[in-house]
Amino acid sequence: MSPSRHAVFGHPVAHSLSPRIHAAFAAQTGIALQYEAIEVAPEAFTASLASFAAAGGSGANVTLPLKEAAFALCADTSARARRAGAVNTLIRENGGWRGDNTDGAGLLRDLGDRQGLDLRERRTLLLGAGGAARGVAPALLDAGIGELFVINRDSARADALVDAQEQPGRVHSRYYTDLTALGEFDLIVNATSAARNGGLQKLPMSLVGARTACVDLSYGEASIPFLAWARAASAHDAVDGLGMLVEQAAESFALWHGVRPETDGVYAELRGRNAALVTAD
Ligand code: NDP
């Protein structure tokens, strides 16, 4: 039987560990799978995806900055993708694409099951309002966090994310210039791609208290500046996005193949290569 054809689309995508992760899941479950990384600029995404489908592509992941564009081209979307307005998983169905978003579920699996963090009632700061932020915000709210403050360079995007949650008493939009007045947070999530785009604004250490967990959705080199800041501010936990990456991939794999792979072995293998980049104590 010829392998089913999958890919991750992004710009840039060379740093992606997804091909490696899906190859490991395929080997573990005995599913024949071809999974490649396809670098594509936003203006060429629709045409590139159409060529992929014409060549037999049956499923894809989508990473920055294409998740909102992916949402727009789907014939059908899951409820969680609609809440996010962003798609990270495409499933070929009836000659079109069905879109889902596994980022939020992946983050919760990692923070809850792997890192052992109880998110309930945590006063939360979310930095960024791009595709990843839109995927994780509804999941964090559903997991029972307390108030959520969203800050983004482009404040209209933060406002849109906040409005989409439809919880005005609980979810608020703020500016980077407000940060020093906001006090301590129990959970700080960096969902920006700032480390690859000129660096994040200086964050005051007053955001961090004795039990604060700082989570960077990025991993590898891109997570170093934010995690270094978290450690310097004596955060209780400093977690990168590697575990989320493996868990969101497992959710995508299950959507395509009907089997949820075991993730601990793949995570441990990748963590071995990134050991210096996470602490959780
Ligand atoms: P998008 O391109 O959709 O959004 C990028 C976000 O970063 C926007 O909010 C943007 O703000 C902000 N940003 C970019 N540069 C800066 C800067 N210099 N200062 C402040 N903010 C900045 O990307 P995604 O949302 O898809 O991805 C964001 C990050 O999350 C990436 O690092 C990605 O690797 C990671 N990620 C990790 C996953 C995992 O499984 N671990 C899954 C998904 C994403 P503005 O709107 O103002 O431009």
Image: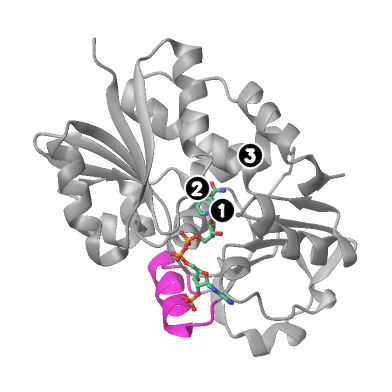
Marks 1/3: CA–CA distance: 16 Å
Left or right: where 278 falls relative to 176 = right
Span highlighted in magenta in the image? 152-168
Mark in the foreground, 1 or 3: 3
Looking at this view, is 16 or 203 the one in front? 16
The numbered disc on residue 207 is none
Helix, strand or loop at disc 2? helix
Q: Earlier in the sequence, mark 3 or mark 2?
A: 2
Left or right: where 182 falls relative to 24: right
Query: x%, y% of residue 147?
Result: 62, 67
Residue tagged 3:
243
254 or 140, nearer to the observer: 254
Quote the CA–CA distance across marks 3 and 2: 12 Å
Residue displayed at 47% across by 24% down:
23
Circle 2 crowding by C-alpha within 10 Å: few under 14, some 14–19, many from 20 = many
Whether residue 88 is visible here, answered yes or no, is no
The residue that label 1 is drawn on is 140
SS at circle 3: helix
Residue type at the position of mark 2: Gly
Q: Nearer the viewer, mark 1 or mark 2?
A: 2
Q: Is disc 1 in contact with disc 2, using a CB cutoff of under 8 Å?
A: yes
**What residue sits 34% from the left and 26% below the top?**
34
